[in-house]
Image (tube, grey):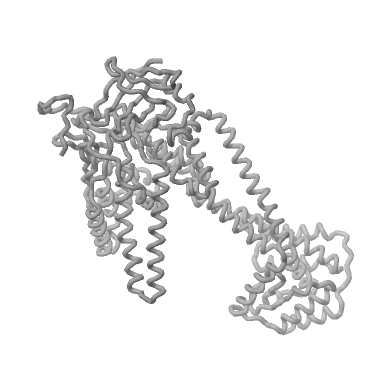
Amino acid sequence: MKSTAKYYDGKTAQPHLVELFLVISANTLEVRQEGEVILNLNLDVVNVLSFSEKHLILEVNEVSNASIEIEDQAFIDYFETLNSNNGGFTLQRKILQVTSQKFLRFFFLLIGFLLLFYFVLLPKVLSSAVDAMSMDVDRQIGDLVYENLQEQESFNFEKGALLTEFYHSIDSNHPSYVQLHLDNAPTVNAFALPGGHIVVYRGLLEKMKSPEELAALISHELSHVEQRHTMKMLAENSTNAVMGYLILGNVGGINVGQSLLVSMKQMSFSRELEEEADLEGLHYLKKWKINPIGFTNLFNILKEETGSGESQSFFDSHPALNERIAQIKRYSKGQSFMPLSEKSKAIFKKLTEE
Amino acid sequence: MEQFNIEGTANPQPTNPVKSYKLEFTGNGMEYFKIQFVNLILTIVTLGLYSPWAKAQRLQYFYGHLNLEGSRFSFLGTGKEMFKGFIKGILLISALFALAMVALKNGQFTLYLVIYFGSFVVLGPLVIYGSAKYRFSRTAWRGILWKYDNTFNYVLVEFLKGIGLTIITLGLYSIPFQNRIRRIVFDNLKFGDAYSAYSGKGMDFFAVFLLNYILTILTLGLYFPIFIRNIIEFNVKNFSIYKNDQYMEFNFEKSNCPNWWGLFFGNYLLTLFTFGLYAPIAQVKIMKAIVDCIEIEGNLDLNELVQANHKEGEATADDLGDLAGFDIFF
């Protein structure tokens, strides 16, 4: 094979026309200027300084910076087939040899797999991992947070004890680690910490009209504790942060898209957990033989407070209230229940009195 | 200046005719995307350690597809060099941080402050100087090497002047400061035995910036692509290369330019909706657009450029530059 190229002697930018003779058997390139052989390049180890689909610059001498710039397509194509180790370009050339079709196929396969992993497999793995962890971890975290809360919030310990008594009266199998507390703030809400601390705000308690509502609230929060929802949310949030940074952070640095996607995923996960808490709560009420109407009334209280029931957006952490009410009604069909004991009713009266 | 006896001629050159130099960017979005995608995977899998090699790939691609008068540029740097520089950068910053902490622990608050602020003040010029020195010493065209010919003192003094002015003007100077940095990097480069000149003036840059900025605000951001183009135009027009009385003038020919507005917003939207995956293709498109707009005219005989520089400098500051998010124009 014979072709021409430009030789730069490294002393000036003046191009010198040379002829290239390929000696395939020895895998060398003979370079001739005006008929005389001026050098022989071993194609196995020659250093590639620059290349594209239409050009190739080979290093002739590292010290003098002499080089050869080749634009002969036949030679370039042949050089591609050599697959020899030519410095940092080897990987790049191998990549570019893959056709666009093959590449796109692999690319979409990989993206598909990553999406599957991230949205389907990973949450399952995380859930199982949290379930496998000992409850002691939950309790340690919960205790720590509760300690801090005590400094910031004001608790009514008398009523807190009453709440706990109420819970004991409706659940004969109550686990010892569940403690209820009453926060004096007028917020209409309640929450559960990992490990068993359940905090009910005075605002919500005051709006309750029947002890069944309190029972429903406790069953819901108890589910959060038993199902270890807070721990699962923590795991979800931290892996989202890590994955988001690792992958999307490296891609284009478009943080808007990244946080949008991640927020939606987190909110969706949170809604899932709330739904689970509702359903598990119903199971508890069934076990305790308590009228599930308490749940419906509870949601009506919340509806009044937030003034909404209908719309559901991707960014709500809880399912729409009407949906939850409908779900409760569906799952509590044909349930048999008994009225609450006199003891429970008395405790409830005391709680909502002052 | 060294004198080379080129082919035995000793006659002074006659004045060369003025001509146009051909500058092309032949990159392809899909190709570059393939390379960047593999870079991305390797970087993630190695938890970032592969970055210097990915950067080498990126630079090799962009250099290799830049065609001046029929010859391509070469990037002679390697991932290994830049990785070593990266490590050195980490060690330097850690050492400074450790020193500052020791001072703090020993109650020497003033010393702590000195080290803390001193680091910022010195790291800036160090990054600029080192990055430029490394990058240009690894840039070659037809075997002829470039060189960053300014001294560290020059960079330090100019940078400190800039900091001083910024403080005095309560931040207003930060805009012309960009021009100052452009000048620090692009003025007085050596290209073989030719020199570069960057003649942009701070106040002129300020005026251009301000005008475009106001227009962007008035159009609620729609003018932004043109803003960017006009800044690039300012930079290009003030750049030139000369050798004795021969020159190469760089110009930005708006009539040759593609539709900047379409290009810019297209790139932005596509990148946004693909969560960044489109970015490599966007980069190639922008580079192509910029190079298409650039026109070079002059009478410098490129064939007579003489090798006057050698491969030197270390990779440290180039990577410190990346750590600080400092991105060089080329």
Q: Nearer the viewer, residue B293 or A339?
A: B293
| Residue at x-position 72% and y-position 80% | A160
The quarter holding residue B145 reads top left
B131 vs A54: above or below: below
The quarter holding residue A54 reads top left
Q: Nearer the viewer, residue B3 or B298?
A: B3
B232 vs A100: above or below: below
Q: Position of residue B14 (x, y in %)?
A: 11, 26
Side of B11 where B272 appears, left or right: right
Q: Nearer the viewer, residue B60 or B178?
A: B60
Task: Locate the C terminus of chain B and report the quarter of the image it occupies.
Answer: top left
Q: Position of residue B239 (x, y in %)?
A: 24, 41
Q: Position of residue B254 (x, y in %)?
A: 30, 36
Q: Position of residue B15 (x, y in %)?
A: 12, 28
Task: Locate the N terminus of chain B and report the quarter of the image it occupies.
Answer: top left
| Residue at x-position 51% and y-position 43% | B40
The quarter holding residue A315 reads bottom right
Side of A98 where B183 appears, left or right: left
B301 vs B270: above or below: above
Q: Nearer the viewer, residue A249 or B194?
A: B194
In the image as oriented, which residue stretches furthest toward the left?
B11
Task: Give the total of numbered labels.
Answer: 0
In the image as oriented, which residue stretches furthest toward the front?
A26
